[in-house]
Amino acid sequence: MEKNKSVEEFISKKTEWKESLELLRAIMSSTEMKETIKWGIPVYTIDGKNVIGLGAFKSYVGIWFYQGVFLEDKEKKLINAQEGKTKGLRQWRFHGFDDIDKELVLQYTKEAIQNQKEGKEIKIEKSKGFEIPKELDALFASNKEAEVSFSKLTPFKQKEYVEYITTAKREATRVSRITKITPMILDGVGLNDKYR
């Protein structure tokens, strides 16, 4: 993930989308939202709450409505990029500068701002506990140090390891994953720490 320190830096790295990003930024800046950088991308907030993010990829530039599920979307512009996973987030993709209808984008943006002011948001459900898979139990039985290190990890990091193992379909894959993660657990690092 890119670590941009400013919106200008983000836009300067996306030369093929520069004009589109500058237009979208101008639309966002014409509102009362505050501009910031989060996760290396431009994010626009109201009262510290994320309302809209900007992104650029190979084939499109887009805006993300963090609580887009509440938008009326009369023009059918929004998509859920991860059906079944994403609850509130909705994207609007533009494949060229001419795809950006400034007035329509502003209309959706103002609705998103109003929704945020009214407190419309998906509440994140607390995740339920998890069961330690037999492969991890076997590791702990043979390596008490690994068990102690695992217990010191945050519940989120523990769950990442459990899901990493349990999502493997084949027994051989599960075993190879245990071998891979054992040194990481002993070092007290999370599965995806290097990406954070």
Image (cartoon, rainbow, N blue to C red):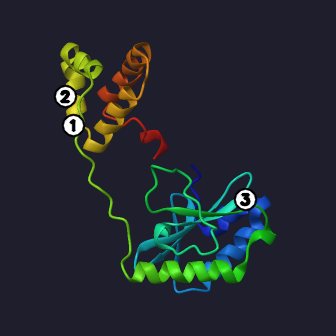
Q: Camera-side residue: 138 or 118?
A: 118
Instruction: Tell me the number on the disc at residue 14.
Output: 3
Tally the numbered discs. 3
Residue type, mark 1 in image = Lys
Mark 2 burial class by Cα count in 10 Å: few <14, some 14-19, many 20+: some
Instruction: Tell me the number on the disc at residue 148.
Output: 2
Q: Camera-side residue: 85 or 26?
A: 85
Contact flag, marks 1 and 3 (Cβ < 8 Å): no
First reached walking from the N terminus: tag 3 or tag 2: 3
| Residue 47 locus on image (x, y percent) | 40, 80
Residue picked out by circle 1: 152
Check disc 2 and report its element: helix, strand or loop. helix
Residue type, mark 3 in image = Lys
Contact flag, marks 3 and 2 (Cβ < 8 Å): no
First reached walking from the N terminus: tag 1 or tag 3: 3
| 3 sits left or right of 158 in the view | right
Mark 1 burial class by Cα count in 10 Å: few <14, some 14-19, many 20+: few
Residue 53: image quadrant is bottom right
On screen, 71 above or below 133? Answer: below
Kindly identify the residue that appears in the image at 38 percent across and 75 percent down: 120
| Residue 41 locus on image (x, y percent) | 57, 62
Contact flag, marks 1 and 2 (Cβ < 8 Å): yes
| Residue 62 locus on image (x, y percent) | 65, 63
Kindly identify the residue that appears in the image at 19 percent across and 28 percent down: 148
Check disc 1 and report its element: helix, strand or loop. helix
Between the residue at mark 3 and the residue at mark 2, the CA separation in whole angstroms equals 45 Å
